[in-house]
Amino acid sequence: MRAPLLAGTVASITGTAASIGVVLTALTGLGATPDQTATAVFLMLISYGLLSIGLSWRFKMPISIVWSTPGAALLVSSASLELGFANATGAFLVTGALLALTGLWPALGRAVSAIPKPIASAMLAGVIFPFCIAPFQAISEYSKIVLPALLVWLVLYRFAQVWAAPVAIAVAFIGIWFQLGVSVPQAQILPVFEVITPQFDPFAVVGIAIPLYLVTMASQNVPGIAIMKTFGYDVPFRPVLTTTGLAAMFAGFFGGFSMNLAAITAALNANEHAHKDPKRRWLASVYGGYVYLVIAALAGITVAFVLQTPRDLVLAAAGIALLGTIISALTSALEEPGLRLPAMTTFLVTASGVSAFGIGSAFWALIAGLLVWGWLAQRKN
């Protein structure tokens, strides 16, 4: 039992530590209060734990449910739209409904999968680009904190890649603690639960809900299913997508924004290190689910600590966690010569942060990339 326990623990801690800064920045940037932020994080982690345990036990597969780090990065860029947290919550509910609908109507999932991978990857790279340059922008003012974290990330990226992001984040937070005197305050385990009355602004639906759905599908659910297939697991598409979509809708009333399959950390629970017998690897995701429940108890303390930290350092820590992601995204975006121009168009429009009619850059970038792709395809014909 030690191998599944270790694999599940590593996967859950890695997935949480590597992205908590992005998630908190997203929620606070959208206008969530400290109590709303703590509640959202607590409920998302509880949901990930329960869903990972339930789905893995039901289908006897290592099915890991996590939050969408690229989706959180997208929400950070959406903060510039200044739509308010009530409208953002309405958008989260629409995203959850779209995820559930994808499970009930697989044709919708196939339509998302039909978007060329380089264009989807370029959109992802553009979304997280501002984060990935943040560590280097912060060096001039916070070199004693950022440089050690970057060095640790670089060393571990070579020798123990899975630990690179979480350990680097831990080093950054320790540096913040000692260098800036930011303390770990007393915080209650259970947050003050506050149901948010959602508002459904059309601009929030188009500018937040649809891009969040596309990013979640393209960067989490689709690759998560593909990764599981490489280990011999055929994830039951309909029940998993329907369940996570409905759970996302419930969490949306409290500020939670996504429920989706793990992508990068999925392999930790599905490979031979989790268990020699593939039929027993589902235990790793079950143990990982219990770890999420434990981590949820620290949500209040974590939120309080991060809210005391200068924003530039929070963004820098998040950027370090996303360095591996942008490497993979840019590599995928440029892998097909015939799609490099549409992909780069998508990347540049997303990274520019341009908005129009109250709709953020991710949506316009996708439209621009698809138009360029269609134009070039038509010219060839």
Image (spheres, helix red, strand yellow):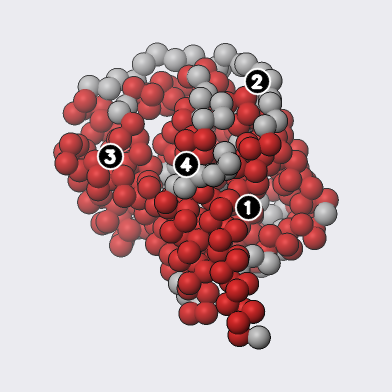
Element under label 3? helix
In front: mark 3 or mark 1? Answer: 1
* Residue drawn at (16%, 41%) of the image: 140
Amino acid type indicated by mark 4: Ser
**First along the sequence among labels 4 and 2:** 4
Question: What residue did someone put label 2 on?
Answer: 196
Question: What residue did someone put label 1 on?
Answer: 214
Q: Dots 3 and 1: beta carbons under 8 Å?
A: no
**First along the sequence among labels 3 and 2:** 3
* Residue drawn at (67%, 32%) of the image: 201
Vertical order, 326 against 339 (above or below): above
Rounded to the nearest angstrom, the CA distance separating label 4 from label 1 is 15 Å
**First along the sequence among labels 3 and 4:** 4
Q: Position of residue 85 (x, y in %)?
A: 57, 26
* Residue drawn at (60%, 66%) of the image: 371
In front: mark 3 or mark 4? Answer: 4
Residue count near mark 1 (Cα–Cα under 10 Å), binned few <14, some 14–19, many ≥20 = many
Rounded to the nearest angstrom, the CA distance separating label 4 from label 2 is 22 Å
Question: What residue did someone put label 4 on?
Answer: 77
Amino acid type indicated by mark 1: Leu
Amino acid type indicated by mark 2: Ile
